[in-house]
Amino acid sequence: MTPAIKVLLVDDQALLRSAFRVLVDSEPDMRVVGEAADGAAAVELARSTGADVVLMDIRMPGTDGLTATRMISADPELAGVHVVMLTTFEVDEYVVQSLRAGASGFLGKGAEPDELLNAIRIAAGGEALLSPAATKGLIATFLAQGGGSGGEGPGAAEYSERLAALTTREREVLVLVAAGLSNDEIAERLVVSPLTVKTHVNRAMAKLGARDRAQLVVIAYESGLVRPRVE
């Protein structure tokens, strides 16, 4: 039997945490292992509970969600912890910062219950939680912040050598991941199996030092491999 997904709830609103707890604990394949009202407590609980997924509010008094996510991402002992940022809006000014901090994705607080539960399962599986709408917002934010500099920014220099290690097909898959396509969609586009796509994605992650699929999107734009277009 597959172990239940261990979920840590982090939000300064106790009422919201209670609602999330009832929802998560109602599912047979997941359970809440802890709650925190600020980022500092979240990092400690991530260590002590062995959480698989952290639902992390961005804006909190004291240590905010971004800082806490960076702390979790920088701790080798917490390499298996996946953070899903909770935002008031699906796309806001903190989205890029969240992904750069190491989050696996983000979800609006107004999401439907099924969306939240699906997000937990997706994150636990190491996938990126980036909807097409969110990806478009992410690209727009990169443009506004000067990201996707066409291979001339500091991100390009940082990733140049690692990008060179990718095969032609891995680079092709990376570009499609950055466009917000799922493995099934990429498989259809390239006329290969979803399992083959997953293998290419995993190899690209390993070569680029990406924690998960969300980080691949960030790398694709910051390195200049993909140049955002304004529609």
Image (cartoon, helix red, strand yellow):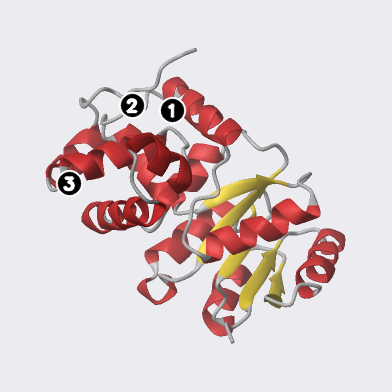
Q: Nearer the viewer, residue 168 or 129?
A: 168
Asked if the residue under mark 2 is in contact with the one under mark 1, i.e. CB atoms within 8 Å, the reply is yes
How crowded pointer 1 is (Cα within 10 Å; few <14, some 14-19, many 20+) is rated as: many
Q: Earlier in the sequence, mark 3 or mark 2?
A: 2
Residue 16 horizontal side relative to residue 220, left or right: right
Query: Residue at the location (49% across, 27% down)?
Result: 141
Q: Is residue 169 above or below residue 55?
A: above
The residue pinned by badge 2 equals: 148
Q: Which residue reaches farthest top?
A: 231
Q: Nearer the viewer, residue 7 or 92?
A: 7
Residue 12 location in percent, x, y?
Answer: 75, 59
Query: Residue at the location (34% across, 40% down)?
Result: 191
Residue 153 location in percent, x, y?
Answer: 24, 28
Q: Nearer the viewer, residue 187 or 79?
A: 187
The residue pinned by badge 1 equals: 142
Q: Earlier in the sequence, mark 1 or mark 2?
A: 1
The residue pinned by badge 3 equals: 166
Residue 49 location in percent, x, y?
Answer: 59, 82
